[in-house]
């Protein structure tokens, strides 16, 4: 059974349709990269999966033990988020809010989980530091640790390496790959087709043409014009 399935999904906002009749499914352990042109609906799709937006038509279902509130989310960072005046520990712990129910406090288990994820992301030495004093790469590690507090099953990542320097980008991709190897299903929006084809098991391209399939099928079809040049470079460099 699929962990996540979108059936005849039509999405948009303010009654404006962006994408129609989208069908795909994600199984446990998949690494799905969503690629496509700017404005094609990638972020809108992710927000709809997270129930931050309502589908205009169609449905989204979860299965294989995944509940709708067990999906971790790493959004694109805004300037406001980058300047947030809270400690690393406080921000990571806030990822446990969905576990609290009606409790107005965090219990020992949730505090322990937050500390575990801080250690997993290699930021224990930054626990007491103010978030806004960190580098971009460190901030992304904090937000990834926060997202892990919400789930050990599926992570949705919206352009997780945007605005990072090349070194920090590689570190972030390596962290995400390790989480995938640990058994977490990954759904990642990326403009970086090279990364999609290096790390992904499946690709969803949305735009004038829609494609969903395995990485090998995507490379074979090469139907997206904005990706074709990058695909050729990847072949030449033998990254896949």
Image (cartoon, rainbow, N blue to C red):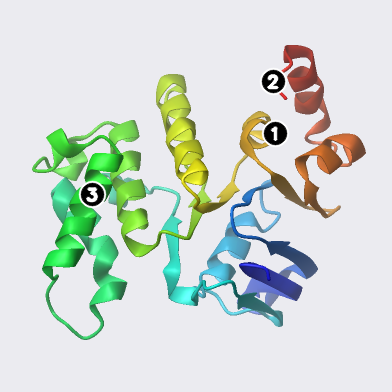
**Image quadrant containing the C terminus:** top right
Q: Nearer the viewer, residue 200 or 59?
A: 200
Determine the CA span between mark 1 and mark 3.
30 Å
- Residue 201 place in picture, x, y as percent: 69, 43
* Identity of the residue furthest to the top in this view: 237
Q: How many marks?
A: 3
Q: Is residue 162 visible?
A: no
Nearer the N terminus, badge 1 or badge 3? 3
Residue named by callout 3: 116
The residue beneath circle 2 is 239
Circle nearer the N terminus (2, 1): 1
Secondary structure of residue under mark 2: loop
Looking at this rendering, what residue extends furthest in the bottom direction? 102
**Local crowd size for mark 2, using a 10 Å CA cut-off: few (<14), some (14–19), many (≥20):** few
Quadrant of res 55? bottom right
Q: Secondary structure at mark 1?
A: helix
| In the image, residue 104 above or below residue 215 | below
Q: What SS does tag 3 mark?
A: helix
| Camera-nearest residue between 33 and 181 | 181
Pick the quarter of the image with the N terminus.
bottom right
**Relative to 89, is 177 above or below?**
above
**Between 194 and 25, which is closer to the camera in this rendering?**
25
Q: Tags 3 and 2 in contact by the CB under 8 Å rule?
A: no
Numbered badge on residue 14: none
- Whichever of labels 3 and 2 marks the residue nearer the N terminus, that label is 3
Is residue 70 visible from the viewing direction of this image? yes
The residue beneath circle 1 is 197
Q: Residue at x 23, y 77 (%)?
A: 100
Residue 196 picture location, percent across and down: 65, 37
**Residue occupying image coordinates x 19% and y 43%:** 131
């Amino acid at each position: 059974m699929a962990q996540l399935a979108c059936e005849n999904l039509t999405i948009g906002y303010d009654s404006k349709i962006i994408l129609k009749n989208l069908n795909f499914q994600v199984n446990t352990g998949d690494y799905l990269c969503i690629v496509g042109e700017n404005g094609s609906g990638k972020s809108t799709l992710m927000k709809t999966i997270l129930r931050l937006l309502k589908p205009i038509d169609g449905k989204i279902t979860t299965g294989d033990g995944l509940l709708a509130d067990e999906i971790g989310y790493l959004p694109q960072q805004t300037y406001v988020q980058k300047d947030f005046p809270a400690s690393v520990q406080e921000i990571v712990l806030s990822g446990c809010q969905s576990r609290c129910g009606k409790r107005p406090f965090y219990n020992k288990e949730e505090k322990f989980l937050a500390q575990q994820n801080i250690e997993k992301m290699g930021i224990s030495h930054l626990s007491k530091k103010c978030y806004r004093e960190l580098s971009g790469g460190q901030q992304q590690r904090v937000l990834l640790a926060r997202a892990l507090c919400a789930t050990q099953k599926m992570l949705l990542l919206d352009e997780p390496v945007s605005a990072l320097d090349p070194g920090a980008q590689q570190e972030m991709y390596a962290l995400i790959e390790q989480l995938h190897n640990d058994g977490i299903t990954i759904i990642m929006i990326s403009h970086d087709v090279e990364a999609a084809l290096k790390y992904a098991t499946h690709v969803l391209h949305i735009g004038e043409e829609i494609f969903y399939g395995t990485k090998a099928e995507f490379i074979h079809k090469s139907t997206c014009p904005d990706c074709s040049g990058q695909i050729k470079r990847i072949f030449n460099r033998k990254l896949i």
